[in-house]
Image (tube, rainbow, N blue to C red):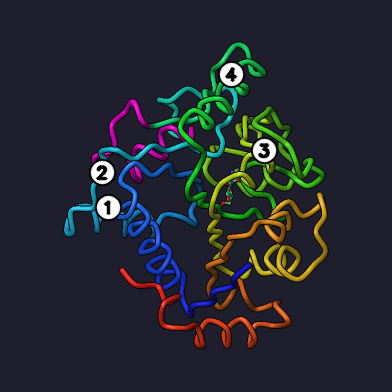
Amino acid sequence: MEIIVQETAEQASMLAARLIAKTISDKPDAVLGLPTGSTPLPLYKELIRIHKEENLDFSSVTSFNLDEYLGLGPEHPQSYHHFMYENLFNHINIPAENINIPDGLTENVPSFCNGYEQKIKDKGGIDIQLLGIGSDGHIGFNEPSSSLTSRTRIKTLTPNTIKDNARFFENESAVPRHVITMGLGTVMESRECILLAFGEAKAEAVRQSVEGPLCAMVPASVLQMHNRSRFFIDAEAASKLEKVEYYNWVFSNKPAWQQFEK
Ligand code: GLP
């Protein structure tokens, strides 16, 4: 696990965007796992800029989104479909047929979820899984107590997450109760994980995920078991970490061949 602390969300996002751009340049048919939320927005903006100004080519890239609200169709302004097209897909050259997002209107949830897992396998697995984190430590919509080996499935949101996400809806009661989310086991099979966390509201979840015990009550702590996971966080999100000086020491003493180059 590597903890990379940057002063601002902007700086952390730029670094993470570089890594993703490099993955795509090295492997044009890379498979990306993508999150929604306010956290990845600066990173998506930067990827769009790199695409437009430096010709980063998404034409062979495949994407799998982490989650979707059940009951919301792709046209719904709060659906994650809508979010992804608005904030990324409409601005890059990824072909529509390479975009995968859980279907919030599926009539057969278990069968859809099995099919989603199969599709990830058929594509050869996820190369880079990008993640945000909920204030309760959830990743995707794997709420506290999610099995650490869970697969894509239906979940019921906690009242805490409903409250956190109500800001995007008219009111709290408009937030769907159920979602489809990739499981923690699904995320763990990706070759590399990049978790972004910004702001003080995420500091406690980051502390528990990085320095607390691995446990289902803090879903992001499962990344302690991943052999290639990195947290890109800003100073506020790092404010509760006990060993932050050590993480900074490691980052500033990386051997040249391990530095993030283009
Ligand atoms: C939702 C998403 C998560 C995301 C989280 C945090 O619950 N399902 O993938 O990480 O929100 O959102 P934000 O980045 O807006 O804080």
User: Which residue sits at x=69%, y=27%?
Assistant: 154
Which image quadrant is residue 75 in?
top left
Cβ atoms at labels 2 and 3 below 8 Å apart: no
Q: Amino acid at mark 1?
A: Ile
Q: Residues within 10 Å of mark 1 (few under 14, many from 20)?
A: many
Mark toward the start of the polypeptide (4 vs 1): 1
The Cα atoms of the two marked residues, 1 and 2, are separated by 6 Å
- Are the residues tagged 1 and 2 within 8 Å (C-beta)? yes
The first of marks 1 and 2 along the sequence is: 1
- Looking at the picture, how far across and down is residue 15, in whole percent? 40, 69
| Label 4, label 2: how far apart the Cα atoms are | 27 Å
Q: Inspect the image, locate mark 3, and give the three-letter code of the amino acid beneath it.
A: Gly
Q: CA distance from mark 2 to mark 3?
A: 27 Å
Where's residue 74, x and y in %?
43, 25
Contact between labelled residues 1 and 3, with CB atoms less than 8 Å apart: no
Q: Residues within 10 Å of mark 3 (few under 14, many from 20)?
A: many
Residue with the mark numbered 2: 92
For label 4, the SS is helix
Q: Secondary structure at mark 1?
A: helix
Q: Dot 3 corresponds to which residue?
A: 183
Q: Is residue 136 visible?
A: no
- In the rendered structure, which segment of residues is drawn in magenta? 78-98
Foreground tag (4 vs 1): 4
Residue 95 showing in the rendered view: yes
Tell me which numbered mark, 3 or 4, is placed earlier along the sequence: 4
Magenta segment: does it hold 88?
A: yes
Circle 4 sits on which residue? 112
The residue type indicated by label 4 comes to Phe
- The C terminus lies in quadrant: bottom left
**Image point 56% across, 46% down: which residue?**
190
User: What is the number of the mark on residue 48?
Assistant: 1
